[in-house]
Every structure is written in structure tokens, then in C-alpha cells.
Image (cartoon, grey):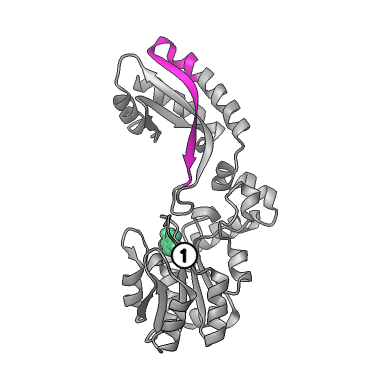
Amino acid sequence: MVNNNAAAVLLALTALAAGKGVALSRGELVEIGGSFRLPDIMARSGAELVEVGTTNRTRPADYRAAAEGGKAQLLLKVHTSNYRVVGYTQEVSLSELVGLGRAYGMPVLYDLGAGLLLPPRLLGLPEGTPSVAESLRAGADLVCFSGDKLLGGPQAGILAGRTWAVEAVRKHPLFRALRPGKGTLAALDATLRLYQDPAEARRAIPVLSMLSAEPKELSARAEALAQTLRAACGPRCAVAVESGESEAGGGALPGVAFPTSLVTLAPRDRTPEALEAALRAAPVPVAALLRHGKVAVDVRTLRPSDDEALCRAVSEGL
Ligand SMILES: *Cc1c(COP(=O)(O)O)cnc(C)c1O
């Protein structure tokens, strides 16, 4: 375990691939945000990037050519966590890549990004959302993922895989420089304990309970919140419940929308923009949406204990 997944990828490449060629699809040359750009991390690690395929289509033959030409000694796959390539596309799956790795005697490293630990259907996520267990079962030698994002714990980077690969990472001098502090270890430990019972994890870990909230439950909560807001605002604001979509964001599920219920606010004496700004500036700041000329709050992102602070912020912001 290290400080974040960017560190995990840097460490994995440094320990396993310094001085070697690493084959990576041009469709997976990602920038995650901040200054995490795969080609830069690769350069820092001392590995040499061997680009294969094209932006939209990469085939097994592209990796084969890199292996047979002696250019690549390691295969890397990166999950495209914050964008999707659609249209005329082809991708080499992790299992196919593992097959190629075995054929050429090359290790396979997978930067999974978000560390989904439960089967996607248990959380209502799209079938095929890659999980840690499935990636290890597919045969990756080393899988890197974040401790936050879909895992729901503290910011951290986790490396899991075959003993030889994890040992190589653990023994590398860079590991000591990237290892997290006690607070992070304790927080991840507490989060992982919740996973011993998947139902409990789904209930108690905020990101999982929000992602898996049922539309019926969300609409009931929206109606109740709208009632409370109407009582608090009176004629100063029209309050309604509308259906909408939540986006997971956070670099985990690009282009995936979840049906949700929104509470919308149309203030009488102020513009929606002014109310939205006032909510952000409230003592407990509220990040609301501006949608079709109204301020909208997605109840999926609220905990019941948030209602009181929200009502106060709205009432004072009108
Ligand atoms: C999010 C992400 C990272 C960076 O993870 P951090 O924990 O934020 O450093 C790296 N690779 C992929 C594919 C990601 O989705």
C-alpha cells in the first residue's frame, strides 16, 4: 500500500520495468487529472513507453509485433476511468493480454484505477465494470487501484497480485518513500473490515450506499425533503421534485448515469445563479446544480442528517 494510485503505478513501473520497454495501447495513454499523465509517469520510472495500436483500435497483433520486435518486455493495461472511446473501436481485454503475456513470457500490469471490491451487480453498476477480484482472476501479475474512488476508503494506492511481483515492489527503495502514514492505514483497515459483510459495506460506506440507492427510496426522500423545504421557505421559493440522472464522476464510471430524484428550487426574489452561489457560501457549503433555470439538489448525494443544514442554507440564501 502506498499514498495514492499514482504512486502505486510509479512504484510498479519502477520496480518491474525500469530499463525495459512497456507496451501500452494508444487508446489507454491517459491523463487522470492534476499532472498524472501516463507517458510522464513512465518516463519518471525509467521504463520506455512502447505505444501500440491506435487511439480507437488496438488488436492483439499490435502487442505481438512489439513483443516479437524485442521492443517490449512488459505489458501494461490502463482502465480508461474518466473517458470512453465510442464508435469504431477495438480493445484487447485483460484476459487476452494475459494470454499474450504468457505466450511471450512477459508480466502483465493492470492500472485498474477504481478499486471496486464487490461484484458490480450487487451495487447496481453496469455489468462489465471491472473489479479487483475479476482482474486478479483474469491473471494480471500486478493490479494497482485507489483506496478511495469506488473502494470508499482513504486516499491510498494498493498493489495486489502475484507474490513475486508484490515482493519486488515491497523490496524497492522507492516503496519506503511512498508508503502511507498510520492514519491512512487505520482508515483503510476500518473500511476493509466493513467489506467482510458485503451488505454491511453497501450500507455503511457512503459511496456504495449512494451509488446503490434505489430510485423508489430516492423519490420518497425527495418528497420528504421538498415538504420540509416548502415549510421553511413559504412563498419565497417554489419547490418541486423532478426526475434526473446522477453521474458517478470521481474517475470511476465515465458516461454512466443513474436515475435519481432532484429537489428543484425556483426563488421568487433572486436569480437561480444567486441562490446557487449563496448555497456554496453557506456556513455548511452546499454544492447544488443549475438546471433548466432552477437550482437542483440530487438527494442521492445527501444523507438524512444533511437535511437540516440544507434547509437552513436555502432559507438564508433566498
Ligand atoms: C484515479 C486513477 C489513477 C490515480 O489514482 P489516485 O489514487 O488518484 O492517485 C491512476 N490510474 C487510473 C486508471 C485512475 O483511474
Residue 193 visible in this rendered orientation of the protein = yes
Q: Is residue 237 magenta?
A: yes
Q: What crowding class fits label 1: few (fewer than 14 Cα within 10 Å), some (14-19), or many (20 or more)?
A: some
Residue most toward the front? 88
- Image quarter hosting the C terminus: top left
Question: For ligand 1, which image quadrant applies?
Answer: bottom left
Query: Where is residue 235 drawn, in percent x and y?
Result: 41, 10
Query: Where is residue 182 drawn, in percent x and y?
Result: 50, 63
Instruction: Examine the image and state in which quarter residue 65 appears.
Output: bottom left
Q: Which residue is at the front of the view, 27 or 3?
A: 27
Up/down of 81 relative to 44, above or below: above
Instruction: Examine the image and state in which quarter residue 283 appears.
Output: top left
Query: Where is residue 151 drawn, in percent x and y?
Result: 55, 56
Residue at image position (46%, 28%) is 309
Q: Which residues are magenta?
A: 229-248
Q: Mark 1: which secondary structure?
A: loop
Which residue lies under the disc numbered 1? 90
Query: Where is residue 121 drawn, in percent x and y?
Result: 64, 50
Residue 207 shown left or right of residue 179 in the figure: right
Residue at image position (34%, 29%) is 276
Q: Which residue is at the front of the view, 187 or 166?
A: 166
Q: Which residue is at the front of the view, 194 or 247?
A: 247
Q: What amino acid does circle 1 point to?
A: Gln
Q: Which residue is at the front of the view, 53 or 137?
A: 53
